[in-house]
Image (tube, helix red, strand yellow):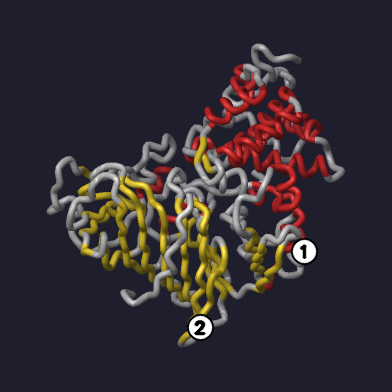
Amino acid sequence: MDDEPLAPEPHRVAPRPVRRSSRVLPGVLLLALCATGCTGGSGAQGAAEASGAGAGTAGVGDALFPRLGNGGYDVRSYRLALDYTPASRRLKGTARITARTDRALRSFHLDLAGLRVRKATVNGRPAKAARSGTELVLTPASALPKGRTFTATVVYDGKPKTLTGEDTGKEGWIRTDDGAAALGEPTGSMTWFPGNHHPSDKAAYDIAVTVPEGYTAVSNGELKGRQTRDRRTTFRWHMGEPMASYLATVAIGRFDVRTTTTGKGLPVYVAVDPTEADRAKNITDQVDDVITWETRTFGPYPFSSTGAVVDHLPGLGYALETQTKPYFDAAPDKTLVVHELAHQWFGDSVTPRAWKDMWLNEGFATYAEWLWEEDHDGRTAQQIFDDFYDGTDDESEGIWDFPPANPPSVASVSDPPVYGRGAMVLHQLRRTVGDKTFFSILRTWLKDHRHGNADTKQFISLCERKSGKDLTRLFDVWLYGKGKPENRYDRPGRGSSQ
């Protein structure tokens, strides 16, 4: 594996379960995952000492996923070289991680579930590696000073895990009928590469995947090269804009590939499982139509390419907004394409700072569905809102179970309040401030936080600044309030007009 070619150096850059964008792995399962052995002994013993250097933390303090992610550094880029054989289901990988310390470190953590670490280096020198559950601790030969860029390389292999949550949803590395799909929301990416797996640490990616000849390997961004040697083909993908690790993906199978451009010249790459070909025959046109409409509605498309993966994975039960190429477990209807492509703006470009703010992803993507229907001779957004309030819409069940901005557990991050009631919050905002101000808020939000992270408080602050209104009551009732509001039109704040 030492000779495995790495991807080129990246450019630095700044239920209706079928509508759901993810399944959630309960924290109890995450903490219980067992790792296989690795070389190097204790990662905390024998570290080179430096004045003020300490150990990096396990976790970044996320209220719902306290052990997810790692403190002490910020990842700038990942270069992943993967080799996978569907017949044996074995994965060989080399991860080269370039990061910058935000404090002096004598050791630091990476998230990795399963797989066997064969070798680890930091800045080209051997590093000690220790495993505890999903934590991989690397101790460099010399402590890392504050404010320095470093490179950690991990060589690993094994059969990657599929994780199953309390709601029977699957994530991680999932076997398909002719290959595999890597789906990462919220914790599954740690099953196929080590990293800082929290959405607050976004990075550029280069992903090279080697598979048997005849297979196709699809990943995020643009295909930069394809080479076949000794009956194995390597596909090299580059994702230049920052990406949260849960949005990274690899799909391996015998796909029919369609490449084109949108009407505005944006490259489109669509991979379709032959089993779904007839049902997905219009997928490229659907992507073009939706991207055109969403660009007109929300502002410039935030990435250098777009597309989709239409796989054949019966029983998965969800689609995922994997960056630049949403993953569909079967041929989608157009409304689902609208939802997942809306995430390219809301969730992929502007990513929540913490998992409790998932309504900023799902509420916005759900409201995009409402706007699409309104603009395409269906119900108005007000009519859809009323149907949700009355409980007559097919997706309205369970929307009052908890406030959208306060999911009570990891198992509830993808529950109906985050989606349907999250969209209702946005509609009440629109009614209160008017269409001109509302769409100005959305465009400003996307412009101000493009390729970054943001939270609910920042969104509320923007809404009040752009509207000139005190929106306290609106958000207290619809976003943070428990139970169903008595009045469907109870929306304004102090200083606002009816």
Residue under the image location 50 percent in, 51 percent down: 242
Residue shown at the point (30%, 47%) measured from the top left: 101
**Residue type indicated by callout 2:** Thr
Taking the view exactly as shown, the residue that stands out farthest to the right is: 377
Which quadrant of the view contains residue 459?
top right
Q: Is residue 470 above or below residue 229?
A: above
| Rendered-image quadrant of the N terminus | bottom left
Q: In the rendered view, does 184 fall on the left or right side of 49?
A: right
Q: Is residue 439 above or below residue 126?
A: above
Residue denoted by label 2: 228
Specify the farthest residue to the bottom: 230
Residue 266: x %, y % from top left:
68, 60
Label 2 crowd bin: few (<14), some (14–19), many (20+), radius 10 Å = some
Relative side of 348 to 7, left or right? right
Q: Position of residue 160 (x, y in %)?
A: 42, 64
Residue 282 bears which disc, if any?
1
- Which comes sooner in the sequence, label 1 or label 2? 2
Q: What's the CA distance linking mark 1 and mark 2?
A: 30 Å
Choose mark 1 or mark 2, whichever is in front.
2
Q: Residue at x 60, y 26 (%)?
A: 479
* Residue drawn at point x = 33 percent, y = 52 percent: 110
Judged from the image, the secondary structure of the residue bearing numbered disc 2 is strand
Residue furthest to the top: 495
Coordinates of residue 158 in the picture (x, y in percent) = 37, 68
- Nearest the camera: 449 or 405? 449
Say whether residue 138 is visible. Answer: yes
Q: Amino acid at mark 1?
A: Asn
Q: Secondary structure at mark 1?
A: loop
Q: Is residue 188 visible?
A: no
Residue contact between numbered discs 1 and 2, judged by CB atoms under 8 Å: no
Please tell me which residue lies in front, 356 or 324. 324
Q: Estimate the x, y position of residue 449 in percent, counting from the top left.
A: 55, 40
